[in-house]
Image (cartoon, rainbow, N blue to C red):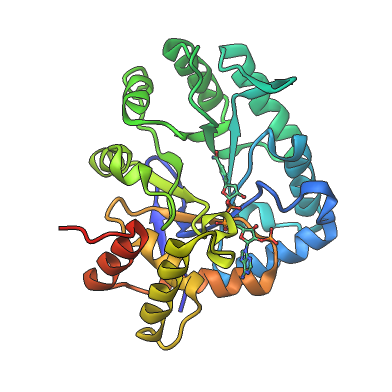
Amino acid sequence: MPLPTIRLHEAAREISRIVQGFGSIIHEERMSERELAAYLDACVDEGINTCDLAAVYSGGAAESVFGGALTLRPGLRERLTVITKYGIEGEGAGYHCYDTSREAIVRSAERSLRRMGTDHIDVLLMHRPDMLMDADEVAEALLSLRKAGKALCFGVSNFLPHQVELLASRLPFPLAVNEVPYNLFDMDMQENGTLDLCQRLRIAPLFYSPLGGGRLFAPANARDRHLLETLREVARQHGDAPVEQIAIAWVLRHPARGAAILGGGRAEWMRRAAAGARIALTRDQWFRLWTASKGYEIP
Ligand SMILES: NC(=O)c1ccc[n+]([C@@H]2O[C@H](COP(=O)([O-])OP(=O)(O)OC[C@H]3O[C@@H](n4cnc5c(N)ncnc54)[C@H](OP(=O)(O)O)[C@@H]3O)[C@@H](O)[C@H]2O)c1
């Protein structure tokens, strides 16, 4: 059965509800271009057609190695939706400097294009809210990139509702994406209005760390262990599915209709987790897991 997909505002293609993340798979030369090309083949075979990168990932090496892998596979670029991000520019001792000025956005996007060896970015995101963001300037930069065909659609990441509304108020096109943390260990975005705004404006949330950044496999306390036990019980109701599939199915059950971004880079793990996108949890199962995660009875 193919992986389910969602359509983003303004996007030409539907993105798979499982996205491959590049936050750490290239880190410290964990994967060569050749190994990444083979891994991308496995992702595409599985129905994953979207990759999540950022200018800052692995100091730029994520985009460069990804670009190298694409050159080893002629035709692969056209099959993939490429997401990348701008905004985190410099690093000092103990701090990051964000820059979302017009020049910095255009410079970052053009550098990403060069590193990846592609002529367009499918979805370009502001990586984190910049406290010095001038929304008019951002709008100018995005419009010029769009006009030049260098980026096709746009979004944000880690934005709270008021920040989404500020930027959206200056754009003549809709924001397509808000990439946010969401998993059974971290539900802030469900509670602070972010996912409600996504649903209202039909912005697709991309859920990062759907497996809790690995916490699912290394429970940190008694509540995590209780949650894991409840996941196993729900998994039994789905033919003894692996718990990561149930964790994925849980985030994808949210009516804002998002996609889950996986972090790891091993084909066997990716296949096991991705199959969670085909599991439909009942309301009863969803609420049972929510309650187990909270660790107290919800009225
Ligand atoms: N926009 C943002 O600000 C932002 C922030 C964070 C992440 N992201 C995006 O989201 C992506 C995913 O984030 P994430 O890495 O936190 O996601 P995740 O999929 O929740 O966690 C990945 C971790 O789980 C471990 N893991 C996966 N399958 C496993 C298995 N079967 N058994 C044991 N361990 C397993 C991996 O181990 P290994 O390390 O051994 O592979 C890895 O450490 C990132 O790559 C990035 O693209 C975006």
Residue 260 x/y as whole percent: 47, 56
Q: Is residue 186 positioned above or below 292 on the image? A: above
**Most distant residue in the bottom direction:** 239
- The quadrant the C terminus occupies is bottom left
Whether residue 117 is visible here, answered yes or no, is: no
Residue at position x 44%, y 44% from top?
11
Question: Going by the image, does 177 lie left or right of 256?
Answer: right
x, y percentage for residue 242?
Answer: 50, 78
What's the residue at 33%, 56% (across, down)? Answer: 294
Looking at the image, is 65 positioned above or below residue 244? above
Picture quadrant of ligand 1 = bottom right
Q: How many marks?
A: 0
Q: Nearer the viewer, residue 127 or 136?
A: 127
Q: Is residue 37 left or right of residue 135?
A: right
- Snapshot quadrant of residue 117: top right
Image: 277 above or below 194: below
In the picture as drawn, the residue positioned furthest to the left comes out as 299
Q: What residue is drawn where x is 76% and y is 66%? A: 38
Left/right of residue 69 with respect to residue 269 in the rendered view: right
Kindly identify the residue that appears in the image at 27 percent across and 37 percent down. Answer: 193
Residue 197: x and y in percent read: 27, 37
Residue 63, can we see it? yes
Query: In the picture, residue 114 is in which quadrant?
Result: top right
Percent x, y of residue 221: 50, 60
Q: Nearer the viewer, residue 262 or 186?
A: 186
Q: Nearer the viewer, residue 25 or 104?
A: 25
